[in-house]
Structures are given as C-alpha cells and as structure tokens.
Amino acid sequence: MRDIAKPDSRFFLKSEYGPLSDDWPAMSFSLPHLKTWLSRSYRPGSDFIIYTGTSGPDTTDQRHRSRLLSLLTIDLMRTYRTEQLIPPESWRWAQQHYPGQWEYAFWVVDGWSIVDLPLSSTVIPTAYEKTGRYPYRGMVIEITGLERENLLSLAISPLTLTRQPVVGEAITLSSLKDSPDLNMEAVRIAGLVFNRVRESGTVQQRTAPDRTAPSDLVLRVGKLLMESPLLCTLCGGLMSIRPENRLLQPSPDRIDSQNGDYGPGNFHLVHFACNLAKNQFSVAEFRQWLTLASASILAEQANTQGAAEMTADGCQPRTDTQGLSLAETI
Ligand SMILES: [Zn+2]
C-alpha cells in the first residue's frame, strides 16, 4: 500500500458485507450525510477508502468476516443510485435481503484487493472497534497514527472492474418534459438565475454564449435536481422537489457570493431557507449561525421528545409555513 499512497494520504474505514468486486463495483451507502461528510474530508487523488467485513452473519462469506477486504478510490463529483452502477442481479439480491439499504453510490475509480485478508482487529484495532458504534455506524472512520502505518505495510493486488453501463443518465429537454414536477422546478430555478443576471449590474453569468441559452440552463438545473441524494450544500440536509414547506425547496446559490458568476463552477442548489440566511455572507459565517441555531433546536427537542427523534435532515423541525410570502431573493 505504501507504493501507491502519498505522504499525506488519508485512509477511511467503511464496514461492508463483502469485498469490492464485479458483483458490486461501486461504493454504496445509506445515510445521505455520508456524502456531505466525505465532500468536506476526502481529497480525490490522494485519499483512500478501506473496506472491512463485519463480524456478524451480515458478511455472508465467513472468510470475509472481520477481515480487511479492499482498498479503493472514489469519484465524489456526483452520486448515483446504486442500481445504476451494479449488475441487476446484485441489486435484486440486495432488495430481497436488505430492502431500502444502500440506495446511493459513488463511482469507484480504482480498486485493489488486500492480499491474505488480514484481521481488522489486528491491523487497525481502534478504528475497527468503532465501526458498529454510534455515531460511526454507516459512516467512515479515519485510520490514523500507528494504525495508518500498519496499513501501509499491507500487500495489495489491483482489481480490474467490469463497469456497468450507467443507465438513466441522459437528460434531454424532452425527457424533462415527461417529468412535470422536475420540469417545473428546473424552469423556475433557471428563471431565477436569469432574472438575477439581468437585474443586477454585478451579477453576471460569465459563460460562453452558447451556454447561456435558456434551454441549456434549464437542462443544467435539471441535472442538478436529479442528483440522488439531493442535498443542500450549505447545511447537508435533504431537499425535495416541490415540498409543502417552501423554505425547504431547492434554490440557486453562488458558491462564492463575492463572485458574480453563475457558471457551472460557482453555482449549486441549496435550501431556500439556507440561501436566505447565508445571503452575502461566507459559508464559514453561515455555518457559525447554523451551529448556534441548530444547537438550541436540538436541545429543545431533546427536552420535549428525546434525542432519538433526530434525523439526518439538518433543517428539522419542519414547520407549517402556509401563507409564506417571502420573495426568493439573494
Ligand atoms: Zn440547507
């Protein structure tokens, strides 16, 4: 492993029911906030994911239980639905045995098998011990210090993965029109961007002329809306298309508010509520507010309902906002 790692490479442990293989050539996950967490921590090009088998019967093959199985690098640019990346028979098996699990997946860029499948508890005892415990369950754990050193000495063997043709990828104007809610949202959001570009002297869409055509922008927004899970980049909470509570609907935001460009590199979708709160401030300033605001809501909920009620949605609790008449502005 030392031969492919960089001096500052980080290794993240994930528990799995089997090794990376042609049967499952993708990194699947169930918790939407794993994506948010990895987007902030995993550096493509230098960091790695390590699979360990679980100790129980969920890891079906006994030879894989509690063993270090695979090493991989992933593409974080976008997420897929797992069924888009794995063979149909594997997805059918998963739905039969573990319905509702591993809905989302990252594309695996490179994969290796770990030779001789060493025991996780011998090589990385501290990190492995955390895998089944709250709050690490379903998430990843960074392997550091001496345990990282132990990893570097392991022998690995490269995998040649057979890729599935990614289905359901093409999005065209006509396919958008087949999905009325998605189409309506894409047109609404693209319209907001155009209005902002037109009305403000400082906000511009600095892209090539052919990319500023309205249909192109509607398609670009449509693609962003089809992300799964559809997450707010600011708070990490789930967004849905045309929710009852308008504060939770997707809204266009410039990643760098000081930069007037709405081009692909500086444009993302966030909750309308998060967009209003962030306004012209930096992400760091916004998150400082979010931490304070959510801490008091969490404490309130813990007092009234118990902490078990909390979900991954960073914008809990949902409240009724009928009659809300806020204009969507920036
Ligand atoms: Zn949000």
Image (cartoon, rainbow, N blue to C red):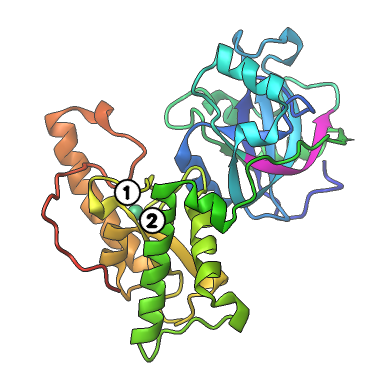
Q: Name the residue rendered at 52%, 48% in the picture.
A: 227
Q: Name the residue rendered at 77%, 54% in the picture.
A: 6
Q: Are marks 1 and 2 in contact (CB under 8 Å)?
A: yes
Q: Given the image, on which type of amino acid does mark 1 rest?
A: Arg
Q: Name the residue rendered at 72%, 28% in the picture.
A: 24
- Judge left or right: residue 196 versus residue 136: left
Where 310 falls versus 182 (above or below)?
A: above
The percent coordinates of residue 108 (x first, y second) are: 72, 42
Q: Quadrant of residue 73?
A: top right
The percent coordinates of residue 295 (x first, y second) are: 23, 47
Return the disc, 1 or 2, that comes first in the chain's sequence.
2
- Judge left or right: residue 190 versus residue 63: left
* 321 vs 169, nearest the viewer: 169
* 19 vs 88, nearest the viewer: 88
Q: Where is mark 1, residue-wise?
A: 242
Q: Quadrant of residue 110?
A: top right
Where 53 falls versus 289 (above or below)?
A: above
Q: Which residues are magenta?
A: 106-114
Q: Given the image, on which type of amino acid does mark 2 rest?
A: Met
- State the quadrant of the C terminus: bottom left
Q: Name the residue rendered at 21%, 68% in the picture.
A: 327
The percent coordinates of residue 195 (x first, y second) are: 36, 78
Q: Where is mark 2, residue-wise?
A: 184
